[in-house]
Image (cartoon, helix red, strand yellow):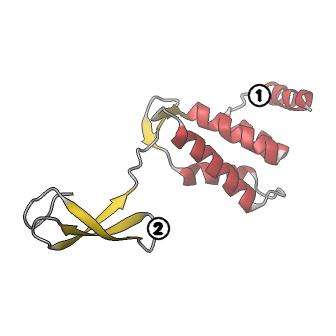
């Protein structure tokens, strides 16, 4: 770390502690050359996940958008908010741990449907009906038949 006073590139860490939010680390340093002290902050660099939508437009992944969509599907269903939050966290973790920085909305939708299928079948069908944009009752029935055959 370069000293802001003398530009020496060597310093030693005197104190290190997390900030109030816990997202950064505050380091108190002392320059080896001039012995002056200064503070640096270390943060985790997060590379955003970009979602490629069906119309080929791109936007940054928004976990709230995913959570709200899944929450809407679970309306008036016996799904605990903690379970839904856990499912969204797992999906977000899968996306962050992926080597791909760009993922399709189709992939995210499939991940969401997999989680909802385990949580509540009615919520799964609701989400699938909006997500897959069922054109008629036959495509809806096909999805229900697939769900029943998996049991």
Residue 109 appears in the picture as rendered: yes
**Residue 13 at x, y percent in the picture:** 29, 66
SS for tag 2?
Answer: loop
Tell me if 36 is positioned left or right of 52 in this view.
left
Residue located 85% across and 27% down the image: 146
Left or right of 108? Residue 124 is right
Q: Quadrant of residue 64?
A: bottom right
Which residue shows up at 16% across the image and 58% down it?
A: 2
Q: Residue furthest front?
A: 32
Residue 136, compared with residue 5, is above or below; it is above
Q: Is residue 130 above or below residue 14?
A: above
Q: Earlier in the sequence, mark 1 or mark 2?
A: 2
Residue 6 image point, x, y percent: 7, 64
Q: Which residue is mark 2?
A: 22
Query: At which x and y percent is residue 118?
Result: 80, 43
The number of discs equals: 2
Counting from the top left corner in percent of width and height, residue 138 is at 82, 25
Q: Is residue 14 above or below residue 125?
A: below
- Give the Cα distance between marks 1 and 2: 50 Å
Q: Quadrant of the C terminus?
A: top right
Depth check: 44 or 74 in front?
A: 44
Q: Residue at x 72, y 28 (%)?
A: 135
Q: Secondary structure at mark 1?
A: loop
Q: Is residue 69 visible?
A: no
Query: Which residue is label 1 attached to?
Result: 136
Left/right placement of residue 100 relative to residue 67 reads left
Q: What residue appears at the point 19 percent right and 73 percent down from the top-left corner? A: 37
């Amino acid at each position: 770390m370069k000293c802001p006073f003398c530009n020496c590139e060597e310093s030693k860490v005197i104190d290190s502690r997390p900030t109030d939010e816990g997202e950064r680390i505050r380091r108190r340093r002392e320059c080896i050359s001039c012995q002056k002290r200064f503070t640096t902050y270390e943060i985790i660099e997060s590379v955003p996940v970009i979602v490629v939508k069906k119309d080929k437009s791109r936007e940054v992944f928004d976990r709230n958008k995913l959570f709200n969509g899944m929450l809407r599907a679970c309306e008036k269903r016996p799904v605990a908010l903690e379970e839904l939050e856990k499912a969204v966290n797992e999906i977000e973790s899968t996306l962050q741990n992926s080597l791909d920085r760009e993922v399709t909305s189709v992939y995210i939708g499939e991940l969401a449907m997999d989680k909802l299928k385990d949580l509540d079948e009615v919520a799964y069908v609701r989400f699938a009906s909006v997500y897959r944009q069922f054109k008629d009752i036959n495509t809806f029935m096909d999805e229900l038949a697939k769900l029943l055959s998996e049991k």
